[in-house]
Image (cartoon, rainbow, N blue to C red):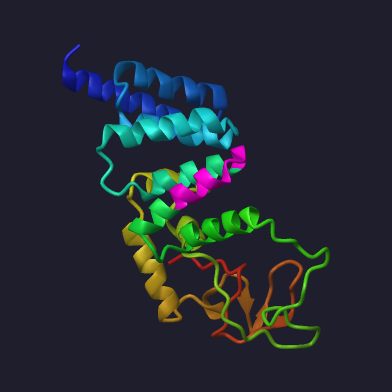
Amino acid sequence: MAKDDVNKVVERYIASGRAEKDVNKKEHYFRMALQLQPKNVHALNNLALLLQHERKFRDSVALYEKILSIGVVARPYPVYYNISICLKNLGNLEGAKTYINRALGIKPGDEMLLELKEEITDLLNSAPKGSAPKMTSSSPGVGEVYDHWDPPAVSTLTSQMYYADWNDYKYHRGLGETDLHEKVVREKLEKRVYCCSSCRYFSAGACRKKGKAGRKVRSDSICKQFIPQKD
């Protein structure tokens, strides 16, 4: 089979795997692609993400490491991030810390990376967690008006605005293809374009989200449950 024909077949296998809902069929398509092109980074990344979702963390790490060994990923921090998650779930906290630090060495201000590092650090330090949640300044009491700035992570907003779901976002992020969308989201947060007044739950000065219905909010505030209206 000619090289161009092989490429087209592999692309079809990958596309079929991503579109398929059945987990076993998804894995089958990705492995078929890898039979033809064992070093195809797209197929490797898709299979690694699938196995990670299925909690087959050791197999997933092996695939991510293969991607890194091929040496064609220009910005490997998403791969480091996913390896760190897998190692954390395997109980290898020192290894998880090493990889998240590598990711942060490339993109030091990334919120999602920083959140994972904090989680790993807490686990390493065995920080005791209180049995009862504490009220914070972002949790107004009954009758108070919510007026705080506590936005969701940029990654969360990006996945909501530009991708089909979280896994779709992670796939594109794993290949370093989400930077432009993340930049747009970050700028909208900085300019307060994203705030309560542009949330789908905001109406007539109040939050209409289930469980918060009727709570008064300032239009220029924001909370973790903010979901932007579609542009």
Q: Is residue 165 visible?
A: no
At a point 62% along the width and 71% down the height, the residue shown is 201
x and y, in percent, of residue 66 in the image: 36, 30
Give residue 206's quadrant in the image: bottom right
Left or right: residue 111 versus residue 108 is right
- Provide residue 223's location: percent of width, then percent of height: 61, 74
Q: Nearer the viewer, residue 88 or 7?
A: 88
Q: Residue at x 38, y 46 (%)?
A: 172
Q: What is the tally of numbered marks visible in this picture? A: 0
Magenta part of the chain:
89-100
Task: Give 48 or 182, whichever is nearer the viewer.
Answer: 48
Q: Residue at x 50, y 50 (%)?
A: 97
Q: Which quadrant of the structure image shows residue 118?
A: bottom right
Residue at the spot 63% in from the left edge and 59% down from the top edge: 122
Q: Residue 73 in the image: x percent, y percent?
A: 28, 42
Q: Main secondary structure of the magenta part?
A: helix
State left or right for residue 46 relative to residue 148: left
Residue 99 is inside the magenta segment: yes
Judged left or right of residue 101, residue 151 is right
Q: Is residue 71 above or below residue 223?
A: above
Residue 212 covered by magenta stretch: no
What x and y, as percent, mark residue 17?
44, 28
Which quarter of the rendered picture does the N terminus lie within? top left
Examine the rendering and report whether any part of residue 116 can be seen: yes
- Answer above or below: position of 209 versus 101: below
**Nearer the observer, 9 or 103:** 103
Q: Which quadrant does the C terminus fall into?
A: bottom left
